[in-house]
Amino acid sequence: MSTSTRPAVPADGTVPADRAVPPDGTAPDRADPAVAPPPGARLAAALPGRVLRTPSEALAVRWRPRAVVVGSVLALVLVGLGVLAMTKGSSALTPGEVVTALLGDGDRKATKIVLGIRLPRVVTGVLVGAALGVAGAVFQSLSRNVLGSPDVIGFTTGAATGAVVQIVVLEGGPLAIALSAVVSGLACAVVVYLLALRGSRSGGYRLILVGIGVGAILSAVNGLLLTRGGLDQAVEAQVWLAGSLAGRTWTHAAPLALAVALLLPPVVWLGRRLAYLELGDDAATQLGVRVERTRLALMVLGVGLTGVAIAAAGPISFVALAAPQLARRLTRAPAPPVVGSALMGAALLVAADLLSQHLPLGLAMPVGLMTGLLGGIYLAWLLTRTKKA
Amino acid sequence: MTTTTTAPDRPRTRPVGRRRRARSRWLALAAGLVALAVLAVLSVAVGSRHVPLDTVRDALAAFDATLGDHLIVRELRIPRTLLGVLVGAALGVAGAVMQAVTRNPLAEPGLLGVNAGASVAVVVAIAWFGVTTPAGYLWFALAGAAGASVLVFGLGGAFGTGSDPVRLVLAGAALSVVFGAFTHAVTISYPDVFASFRFWTVGSLEGRGWAVLLPTAVVVGAGLVLAQSLSGALDVTSLGADLSRAVGASARRTWVLGMVAVVLLAGGATAAAGPIAFVGLAAPHVARLVVGPAHRWIVAFSGLLGALVLLASDVVGRVVAFPSEVQTGIVSALVGGPLFVALVRRRRIAQL
Amino acid sequence: MPRTTTPDVVRTATAGAPPAARLRAEDLTLAYDERVVAEHLSVTVPDGSFTVVVGPNACGKSTLLRALSRLLRPARGQVVLDGQAISSYAAKEVARRLGLLPQTSSAPDGITVADLVARGRYPHQRFLRQWSRADEVATEAAMESTGVLDLADRLVDELSGGQRQRVWLALVLAQETDLLLLDEPTTFLDVAHQIEVLDLCRRLHRDGGRTLVAVLHDLNHAARYATHLVAMRDGVVVAQGTPREVITAEQVEAVFGLRCVVVDDPVTGTPLVVPLDASR
């Protein structure tokens, strides 16, 4: 009798007659008990995605084909955009020349240009976009708000102040500016958090208000520095504040790559728990999720990713906001996907950088402003589409 | 059926509390007005050149056009002081109306795109029209603010049959970002434009005379009248669309008119003094703490608070970096910010 | 219903503890910030019972349940699970022994019933083993015993209140715990769905051999379904025992301040509270 693997149906009277199967396996409505669906089959049909299992179940995961397809397409688009970006510049190269240079077979001039100048810019763009996309996904999931962003706790404003101080007052170089930005951004986030703490809990609402207050103070400091400082320094600060990938070399890209390599895997690991946090704090805690710890860790990682992105390229708007939502829509996922947001963010930023370099606007429009422009237009377009009575 | 409560009997405080609250409101109002008067006097007397008080009195009563001090008082200090009161009141009231209409305590008047629109217009004025004076900026900024708000209203569905003020805020946010990007791009493309623009964009009352005050007074005055007439309806709106319809107030009319008031007030204030962001957000919160949830009081008191903060910031700005000035917009955030944070920490901020 | 994970580990852990009390509260002081809700509260949950906690509003019954499920850390005292302080266990370990149906939970938009119930398997999963065969079987069994298997691919948003509550119950059942805590499982349901959920709880208790602890606000429901009743008032246990022992006219008046007459339920024979007419 093959009923050993089938759970016995409880004799509770609520099971409809056509599903009631007596323990001996002779089902009145089914001719052959061996044809009855194996346990879990009815369920599998109702669950999203497919199951991948090794025989010993060392690996047993559900994966969603649509997500994999979208991710692959995004990756391909990203590579294509990157190669395209590397063909343009003061000396035009063909895509073929770019590819051979990347593979190490190109002539000396092309190799020097591609590997030394254009590739680091593209790599920085990819990493910054990915970091911002993931940070946005984290904050939007944690706050359960499509407008969630790390700047709620004044991080970006703090980073901006640190950079402006470094540029206007201390006249530091790129590394000093990047370090100041990250340090002051972190310090600001910590200060805001501590100020909002009352007893051992920081009410979410109080956190936002304190963040706004601190943000206003820092904006004023920025304004003070920009009006008091010499014009040259003020303009340099204003350029940094626009967010840009211009002149990004391996000294920017390499540390950034290291930081992202360190910060991104833990987010993927913890990101699994986001699905459970969604159920509410009580439900998640009773399932064994350490809610406060997970939230704190994710927030720290999100802030960290935002920090390294700002350090490398200055404050870039909209990618953290838009990439997760676009990725979510494309993959039809219930929540912003972590890896998908990374790929989408990278693609958005590289595309924006391409546009900003080659769009004949007559104005210097660094990538950070280009993303703002595109993002605002996108938002406005969304509004015209969803006209509700 | 008597069900015994588990908590000890609560003392009956309602009628007594209400009387006490009403009395403290009037007291707060009176105190505020007194403080405003004192600040106004200080504002006229203090500056890069201190004018003694009896000279001030003479300048008003027995004006002598040959005396430098009298000219300063008449042509600079008095319009500047009046403008400070006007701009501060406009920002405070605009913030109160904005938060009431959107039912969101984090809303501020700049969300409707007025600041961004004004900034674009000013940067264009400097770059392509060679404008350099606050009086010149004023008209461009007014046009920019008006144009931006028309766009925002259109995008946000205020002209059609839209029923959600939040759409307006989203439209404002979208437009602000687009205009902001453009403005920023101009400032880095033309450094000499940035040289002047950076002083306007922090928010300042410096060099604003009668030429700035008079048009601003008209625009802001209209906004204030509209706002005060709406304050009763705002109480009802804060209950939500369904309830307000039940009570008979037209929710749509209230929020559309409310947004118009915000645009007049915030647009006028920004056109006169440049974008000052923080006052409009913070004043209603503090007002709510002092005078309670009735909107007639919140609107009025927010205006008073805004005026106080701005005037005080202006005076402090003239003193602290003597003989030069720190712009009002900077001081108001540097001083108001910590005070606001302290308040948030100490008291239970009401959530509308 | 045979379990797919062996409870042997659990049984040996209780070998040294008093045989009839896997879950108990010892001298708890429970507070929210500065507001103390209960002091010196000690409650023992008899094994295999269907315990119901009743009491007037703000008497501390939900607070007690939250403490028992380690959602609330007691200011003083401890909750003991299987002979050890509950706070000493790893979070997932507690989740494998004790399940809680919280009062408020939110189902994410657009989630199917099957997907939601499957999340109850979290305590048994790891990063690389996110969906094993055991998970499938347990989830399907949980859905079957709550009668929601037919709704497997429906969206949770589209279900009725009673159906949704059964889905959440299935989620907790998928955890495969012997102890089941339910915080006001019937509060937002109409009377037919209330009975439906309570009948289901009784089946889970009788046929599954589980220990159930529920907070109910309806005294008559409590009398009808409970095998062990705990009556609280102002953070103190005023009476506990079988429904017949606890539900008397004097005790009901003492706990709830309600003057009543207690008769026998004509259908089940359990105590039935009939309030007296206030106008008489």
Image (spheres, rainbow, N blue to C red):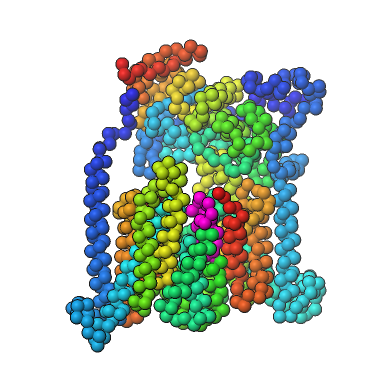
Position of residue B63 measured from the top left corner of the image (x, y, whole percent): 22, 82
In the image, residue A253 lies in the stretch drawn in magenta: no
Residue C27 sits in which quadrant?
Answer: top left
Q: Is residue B271 left or right of residue A383?
A: left
Along the horizontal axis of the image, is A259 left or right of B340?
right
Q: Position of residue B30 (x, y in %)?
A: 23, 59
Quadrant location of the N terminus of chain B in the rendered image: top left
Q: Is residue A312 visible?
A: no
Q: Is residue B5 visible?
A: yes
- Expressed as whole percent of the image width and height from the top left, the position of residue B327 reads 38, 74
Q: Residue at x 26, y 66 (%)?
A: B36
Residue A310 placement: quadrant: bottom right
For the stretch drawn in magenta, what is the main secondary structure?
Answer: helix
Q: Relative to B100, is C235 above or below?
A: above
Q: A154 or A255: nearer the eye?
A: A154
Residue at the far bottom: name it: B66
Residue C271 vs residue C203: left or right?
left
**Residue occupying the point 47% across, 77% down:** B197
Tell me if residue B169 is in the magenta stretch. yes
> Is C73 situated left or right of A96 in this image?
left
Q: Is residue B191 above or below residue A129?
A: below
Magenta-highlighted residues:
B155-177
Residue A103 in the image, given as x and y percentages of width and height: 79, 70
Q: Residue at x 37, y 21 (%)?
A: C252
Q: Is residue C83 above or below residue A219?
A: above
Residue nearest the observer in this picture, A150 or A256? A150
Q: From what the image shows, is residue A267 above or below residue B123? A: above
Q: How many marks?
A: 0
Residue pictured at 60% horizontal, 50% vertical:
A270
